[in-house]
C-alpha cells in the first residue's frame, strides 16, 4: 500500500486530480477517525477532514516525502482540528447533547460483548472529551497515532518538554476519570464541599 500511495502522490503532485481522489479514498477513514478523536463530534470531524484534504491538495507541491503521506495527513488534520476547536471555542453557542453512539461492526455478534464495548467506548470518548483540546490533541497524537514527541511538539507549536508534560497530565486525568482509586471519589466530594 505504501508503494501505491507513493505513486499516487507523485501523480497528484503532477496535477492528476484522479490520483488525489484515490489518495483521499485510501486515507479518508484514518483521517476521519483522527479528526473525530480530536474534536469529539461527527459534524466537526467532517468539517476538519474536508479542510485537511483541501489544505493537502493546495500544499501537495510542498510535500517532500520525508514522512509517509499518511503521517503528513495526520499533521495537517491535527492542525485543522486545532484551528477548528479554537474557532469553535471563540464562537461558542449553546450546545445540544450528542447522544450518537458509533457502531463498531468489527465486533462479533455477541450482544453482551457489543454492549460492553459500546459502554467502554462511551466512557473513553467521554473521558477524552473532558480533556482540554490541548491535552486531547497530545494524547491522541501520541497514544493513538504513535507520533513521536518531537513531531507532536512541532505540529502543536510547543516545546518537546511541554508536549511530554501535557501528555503526562492528560494520561493522569484519563486514568483518574476511567479508573478512580478507592477514596478518590470521596476526596473529590469532600474538596468540593469545603
Image (cartoon, rainbow, N blue to C red):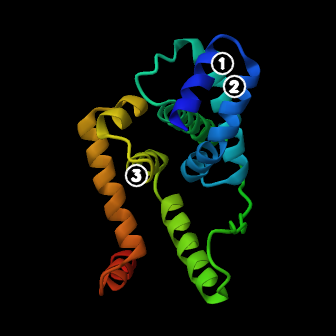
Report whether 168 appears left or right of 35. Answer: left
Residue at the spot 46% in from the left edge and 16% down from the top edge = 64
Residue 192 % position (x, y)? 39, 75
Look at the picture and state if 78 lies above or below 58.
Answer: below
Q: Which mark is residue 87?
A: none
Labels 2 and 1: the sequence-earlier one: 1
Nearest to viewer (mark 1 / mark 3): 1
> Relative to the observer, which residue lies in front, 145 or 42?
145
Residue at the spot 49% in from the left edge and 60% down from the top edge = 128
Query: Which residue has dot 1 on it?
Result: 12
> Relative to the observer, which residue lies in front, 65 or 136?
65
Residue 12 % position (x, y)? 66, 18
Q: Which mark is residue 139?
A: 3
Query: Which residue has dot 2 on it?
Result: 20
- Residue 172 occupies which quadrant of the picture? bottom left
> Relative to the observer, which residue lies in front, 93 or 5?
5
Nearest to viewer (mark 3 / mark 2): 2
Q: Residue furthest left?
A: 161
- Residue 90 occupies which quadrant of the picture? top right
Q: Quadrant of the C terminus?
A: bottom left
> Relative to the observer, which residue lies in front, 131 or 25?
25
Residue at the spot 39% in from the left edge and 65% down from the top edge = 174
Few, some or many residues within 10 Å of mark 1 (<14, 14–19, 20+):
many
Few, some or many residues within 10 Å of mark 2 (<14, 14–19, 20+):
many
Does dot 2 land on a helix, a strand or a loop? helix
Amino acid at each position: 500500500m505504501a508503494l501505491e500511495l507513493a505513486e499516487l502522490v507523485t501523480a497528484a503532485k503532477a496535477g492528476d486530480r484522479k490520483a488525489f481522489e484515490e489518495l483521499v479514498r485510501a486515507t479518508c477513514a484514518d483521517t476521519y477517525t483522527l479528526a473525530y478523536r480530536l474534536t469529539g463530534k461527527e459534524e466537526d470531524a467532517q468539517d476538519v477532514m474536508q479542510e485537511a484534504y483541501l489544505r493537502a491538495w493546495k500544499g501537495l507541491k510542498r510535500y517532500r516525502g520525508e514522512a509517509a503521506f499518511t503521517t503528513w495527513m495526520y499533521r495537517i488534520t491535527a492542525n485543522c482540528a486545532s484551528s477548528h476547536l479554537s474557532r469553535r471555542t471563540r464562537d461558542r453557542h449553546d450546545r445540544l447533547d450528542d447522544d450518537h453512539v458509533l457502531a463498531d461492526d468489527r465486533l462479533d455478534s455477541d450482544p453482551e460483548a457489543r454492549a460492553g464495548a459500546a459502554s467502554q467506548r462511551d466512557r473513553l470518548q467521554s473521558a477524552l472529551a473532558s480533556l482540554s483540546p490541548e491535552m486531547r490533541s497530545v494524547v491522541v497524537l501520541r497514544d493513538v497515532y504513535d507520533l513521536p514527541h518531537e513531531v507532536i511538539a512541532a505540529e502543536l507549536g510547543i516545546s518537546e518538554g511541554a508536549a511530554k508534560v501535557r501528555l503526562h497530565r492528560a494520561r493522569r486525568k484519563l486514568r483518574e476519570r476511567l479508573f478512580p482509586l478507592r477514596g478518590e471519589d470521596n476526596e473529590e466530594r469532600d474538596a468540593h464541599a469545603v
